[in-house]
Amino acid sequence: MSDVLDPAPETLAEIPREPTQDGPKVRLYLVDGSGYIFRAYHALPPLTRKSDGLPVGAVAGFCNMLWKLLVDMRKEADAPTHLAVVFDHSEKTFRNDLYDQYKAHRPPAPEDLVPQFPLVREATKAFGVPCLELPGYEADDLIAAYACKVRDGGGEVVIVSSDKDLMQLVGPNVSMLDTMKNVKIGPEQVLEKFGVPPEKVVDVQALCGDSVDNVPGAPGIGIKTAAQLIQEYGDLDTLLARAGEIKQPKRRETLIAFADQIRLSRELVKLDCDTPLPAPIDELAVEDPGPPLAEFLEKMEFRTLARRVAEGFGGAEARAPSPAPEMRAPPKPQHGPIDVEAYQCVRDIPTLEAWIARAREAGIVAFDTETDALSSASAALCGVSLAVAPGEACYIPVGHEHDGDGGLEFERKEDLAQIPCEEVIARLKPLLEDPSVLKVAQNAKYDLAVLLRHGIDVAPIDDTMLVSFALEGGLRKSHGMDELSKQWLEHEPISFKKVAGTGKTQKSFKHVDLAAATCYAAEDADVTLRLYEHLRPRLAAEGLLTVYETLERPMPKVLVEMELAGVKVDPEQLRLLSNDFSVRMAELEAEAHRLAGRPFNLGSPKQIGDILFKEMGLASGRTTATGAASTDASMLEDLAAQGHELPRVLLDWRQLSKLKGTYTDALVEAISPATGRVHTSFQLAAASTGRLASTDPNLQNIPIRTEEGRKIRRAFIAEPGNVLISADYSQIELRLLAHIGDIPQLKKAFQEGLDIHAMTASEMFGVPVEGMPAETRRRAKAINFGIVYGISAFGLANQLNIPREEAGAYIKTYFERFPGIRTYMDRQQRQVRAEGFVTTIFGRKVHIPAARGKSQAERSFADRAAINAPIQGAAADVMRRAMIRMPGALKAAGLKARMLLQVHDELVFEAPEAEADEVIRIACQVMEKAAEPVVSLSVPLVVEARAAANWDEAH
DNA sequence: TCGACGCGC
DNA sequence: TGGGATGCGCGTCGAT
């Protein structure tokens, strides 16, 4: 153990360090002005100048971006020394001489965008930033020329754009920055996008072409095929020269026939470093904006930004963004065996400081917290483990004690001297909050919550569980550390049972002796780091980096805040309900016994089956999966409808039993004595579609459908002076189906805000919406939902209580009226059977391994899941995007409101009464725009929100 | 530990 | 051919 702190091993030496510079180095930021205007225009709501209605949305977005860039970057180690905004000069460029159809299909700029072009140039000048443009060239050419020049002169370039056409320029000392999504684009992101490194992007683009710019490429070859071909043959010239060797006949012929067109396409996409520079680099040096900026903002009536500018640089807004760890060199895989005896137990401050120094040097540290209980909201810290390289890990105990009741007097007690908890926290805090040191954890949400209660706001953080989930959601049920370790490291970690015992003899972790605790805890950190090194590189390689970064990685922090906030529940109300239910259940039980002629357990489906079908001789209908007679609600309903008394009594008893057992009793138990509120736990890696799950207690299945059930919802309340606000997406899954399946009638109905179920009914049955019978609409509604779930005629017949033939006819009519649905279903089915997974419009992969299963039944289950997953998954993605943006949006508006719960298409907030209207406004706006800017939906998302004293009335 | 059941979206 | 026959979860209870 003594050699643990010896000089850094090889893996540490490979982490790149900031180079030492002798003279001032040029660091040039090039903003793609033209690209930015269009994105800002489409991403932002249309904004007009109050005084005269001049459209200024894109200008406002542009100004905010430029200001943020100037302020943020100034705090950074990599602040720009030089800065310029680059514009397209004219419609015609030298590329039109090469190919007269280049960009020929571009629609003209929207009417309300045109007047904003000159304003953006004016804005740039007001900021004191040079505008670059050159007749006959595109902005991209100028960006390329400046980037090459500065890079070759030993400087560094950051291109502020997300245009894929610029990705060919990425490389050493040239990166891209997408300020709208706040992500850096380096070689890894380019690899994810194009499947090849930046220097081969041009070859891939030449093959697949670009419909937006009207670059022809090779017909029938998309980005995946192109990347595959380039990978195989090395480069485009080799590929074209050896095209005759390609096995697939179609591809071979295409490449031979279109070789010239492909070469032309390469000329069109290739950016030329030799473009003349309209201004020398010296003239691009960064300067502070002067009085013209204030004048310009005043003229535009951008009051918020004007105020910020007046407050000057270094305003409260300015905070360094966390670094993008993906810009680091990928860690070297490590296969050394895991030796739990080699870990160090840290019990003095110099040793602790030495570990902290090593973590800083490495730039990455895996960590894990040990606590004395399971609930992160209340558990006390026992210790923290760190791993700085594979096999190099330690455990820092802070809360271990002797077991109070154990041991005889003469038993020698272990020396438990530890560094005081506050001391450890104080020293770890700067490390764990250091933006330049990446922290890695398994199920980071837990550790985040524990440390947040000790005043540490851990960041930046990566989560191996979520990396695994992004890669393999649906492939495995659990993304727990033990399973991942066994599979990827071929190592079975020490089980918690082994160190703490099990059942009655299980002890709290704080009573585990330090040697055993060190082996167990440090191993977790070690395994986490090794898993990270194994799994992380796969994200980019498999095209899932963006999914992880945008849909997974930001979530733990958001959820921790919700879980710690908790929701207030009125225990008195629940106890009253519980008593009421008890009394009525006792009455129903007596009645049931009387009707059966003997006592029996009403909670036992088996006994109910015996009584109904054997003793009373009723005709048993369906059976369960195991062959037992079904006694579920629909069965009992059928029997009750036949006039039997007992089934009705059983149904009533079951309803009360369910409400009492699952809700009223359990919820009272779940109220935290410390906060008086209920703190659920949200699971991120539970549902393969990306939905969250809620446990301990589950607050996503609180009753709503029946009056008795709603009484439980009424017990969810706000603190005095506050209200609960519920905001839910209206029909989000059907809307997404309309978009994904491209169903014109559905899209039109949503765009026009029609009653979607009535429209469906009208379309199917040929009856007008006006005066439509309720039953007709109800049937259409059931079909709409059935379609989303991949229903069959049998299922629909069951649902609607109609003959199977009739249900079959409905489905047939539906497919005839909406042919897009059939196409969509077939597409998903083929996809899942070919690849074993389907994908949401946001890129999330949902694996459905049963699609390749043996039995027909297994595969048809998979088919239905494949139909549902892209819809349910896209809805889950939209909701995650909204949740990630919500805390910032509320804070920016100066509101105290907090998000408390998520129920798949609903968010619940608590806010001071006076804030209610504003919270509703912001919540709706964030939720309705959540898909943007990455996905432009062809249907609007609509959110309905209400504030009230309890959840029932708010919903 | 498993199956049946029932609550939610 | 014909059986099986709506997606995703979690918690409770009884039976084993």
Image (spheres, coloured by chain):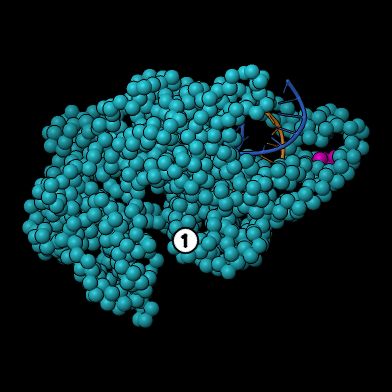
Chain colours: A cyan, B orange, C blue
| Side of A402 relative to A648 (left or right) | left
- Look at the image and tell me in which quarter the C terminus of chain A lies: bottom right
Image: magenta residue range: A646-650
The residue to which callout 1 is attached is A891
Residue A24 located within the stretch drawn in magenta: no
| Side of A567 relative to A883 (left or right) | right
Foreground: A585 or A855? A585
Q: Residue at x 73, y 37 (%)?
A: A632
Residue A647 located within the stretch drawn in magenta: yes
| Side of A874 relative to A902 (left or right) | left
The percent position of residue A465, horizontal first and vertical second, equals 45, 35
Q: Quadrant of residue A276?
A: bottom left
> Seen from this angle, which residue lies furthest front?
A410
State whether the magenta stretch is mostly helix, strand or loop.
Answer: helix
Residue A252 visible in the shown view? yes
| Side of A807 relative to A200 (left or right) | right
Foreground: A669 or A793? A669
What's the amino acid at mark 1?
A: Lys
Q: Quadrant of residue A248?
A: top left
Residue A168 visible in the shown view? no
The percent position of residue A622, horizontal first and vertical second, equals 72, 33
SS category of the residue bearing label 1: helix
The percent position of residue A470, horizontal first and vertical second, equals 42, 38
Mark 1 — on which chain does it sit? A
Q: Residue at x 10, y 51 (%)?
A: A149
Q: Residue at x 22, y 33 (%)?
A: A231
